[in-house]
Amino acid sequence: MKQNLYNYILGIADNSLILGQRMGALTGHGPSLETDIACTNISLDLFGQVRSYYQYAAKVAGDKRTEDDIAMLRHEREYLNVLLVEQPDTDFAYTMGRQFLFDVYHFLFLTELQKSKDLTLSAIATKSLKEVSYHQRFSTDWIKRLGDGTEESNKRMQTAIDDLWTYTDELFHQTDADKEMVAEGIGVDVTTLKEAYYQKVADVLQESTLTIPESKYFQKGGKQGIHTEHMGYLLAELQYMQRAYPNMEW
Amino acid sequence: MSEEQIKYLEKQFEERIARDEKIEPKDWMPEKYRKTHIRQISQHAHSEVVGMLPEGNWITRAPSLRRKVALLAKVQDEAGHGLYLYSACETLGISRDELYEQLHSGKAKYSSIFNYPTITWADMGAIGWLVDGAAIINQVPLCNTSFGPYARAMVRVCKEESFHQRQGYEIMLKLSNGTPEQKDMAQDALNRWWWPSLMMLGPTDAESVHTEQSMKWKLKRKSNDDLRQQFIDQTVPQADILGLSIPDPDLKWNEEKGSYDFGEIDWDEFWQVVKGHGPMNKERMKARVGAWERGEWVRDAAMAYAEKQQERKEKQVV
């Protein structure tokens, strides 16, 4: 099996899986029916992407594993998503802050992934990019509304951005699989996205009358499978059925 | 308007309905027609929105990615139905905020079935198969109801509901053909959802307050008991295909009648749940009111931002 390619696919897909799981959990509990529908939509898009990636990963693995085995039967240390996407929905400002900080990265990343020599990855990137450009518009609009809305919403939005900021730097860390895939013309060199990312984020925050955090202390670990304490609970729900009733079809 | 004039308008109105013409929001309508429609359409909208909760309960735990995506899409459809129905209701001169207020204060009702808990994955199958099945039987006749916006909303709602029902039945089929544990899970779900599904079609005709007037306005085309019989006759053979047994020892084919005889429904349970004392009434309301209250600052911010944008635009023009 091409271990590097397999790990590379998981590194991309796990972000969508965990963020999709977070957004899906909000269904029925949104601040209005319209935002509820939009958040469910984002979750649906992300899970659609996840299925394409994992089906491809299963093919690369070349054994009997399925998309569901990959999604639901790994140990926590084997999930490679960034810490940002597993952060909890403390309030709607955190939900939108998390989404926005990821969407800006996701959009830049997929734009580059379209150029991959790997035709499957490039095709998934092209399809996903249409969805993610909508996600980015949606979350950007909410950052503006909440940032430049009321005094309370501005305070909440600022708090969320300040708290989530520490997880942004990890988006641009390269793993060994990343480096290998970049060398082969398959992967995206995420270090090259950093400048455009912080520029775009700063522009939106400024327009939203929010302060750009100055903290230089960042957290990392997700890409090596070392997660925050939130992750175990998220996985407990995600894996519940597959763990409680192993080897069954649903 | 004099009493005579009103009587004349009412007569014309009833004749239009009898000719199967649609009543549109701007047409004259008797006050009772308006009120009855606000009550029924909003009750329906509330049922969609509260109905998102029992199924939403399994989104994070769906057993496969395929099932998770299908469940997300289904619950999202319900939110969409809520949205059309609230909009249809608003054409009658009431705001969505007022309708929410009625729901949250307990003044407005929603379908009692959603006050039962979803405790296993099989409940996602049973709800789709039985609850959506019963809903379709209730709703298909409404595609031809007299009030235009409601009738048009129902055409779309019914199409999506019948898709949901097939999806639910397919979950049950997979479980019934699965391991003994899965089959037990399916049977247990049928046992718990069967009677509440029968109750969903409403009290017996003798106790149903609104039936006669509703028939005239085509808000109802068959009585509750007829609908219930139709549901049972349609569902029993489907249970046979699944190899599951209906939890009713009195259920028996009646050759003469050409339909099934069935056992006594526990109407005390029905009224207990309707009056707010079912297993999940309090939790469902807490979830709805909680979401609304937690969302208040978000809605306020969106409103404040929209106003600021408008002001900025106006300044630019000047």
Image (spheres, rainbow, N blue to C red):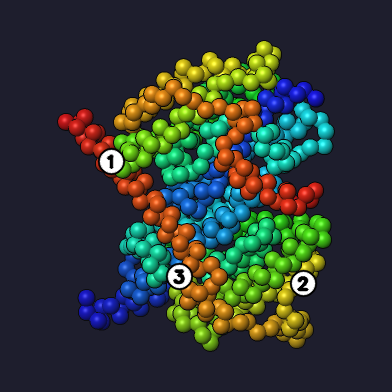
Determine crowd level at label 2: few under 14, some 14-19, many 20+ residues with C-alpha closer than 10 A. few
Q: Amino acid at mark 3?
A: Lys
Label at residue A151: 1
Q: Which image quarter holds the C terminus of chain B?
A: top left
Report the chain holding disc 3.
Answer: B
Measuring from the top left, give residue A58's x and y in whole percent.
Answer: 76, 33
Circles 2 and 1 in contact, beta carbons < 8 Å: no
Alpha carbons under labels 1 and 3: distance apart = 36 Å
Chain letter of mark 2 equals B
Q: Are marks 1 and 3 in contact (CB under 8 Å)?
A: no
Q: Amino acid at mark 1?
A: Glu
- In terms of secondary structure, where does tag 3 sit? loop
**Marks 2 and 3, how far apart in space?**
32 Å
The residue shown at (68%, 74%) is B232
Residue A120 visible in the shown view: no
Front residue (pair B196, B91): B196
Q: Which residue is mark 3?
A: B109
Where is mark 2, residue-wise?
A: B245
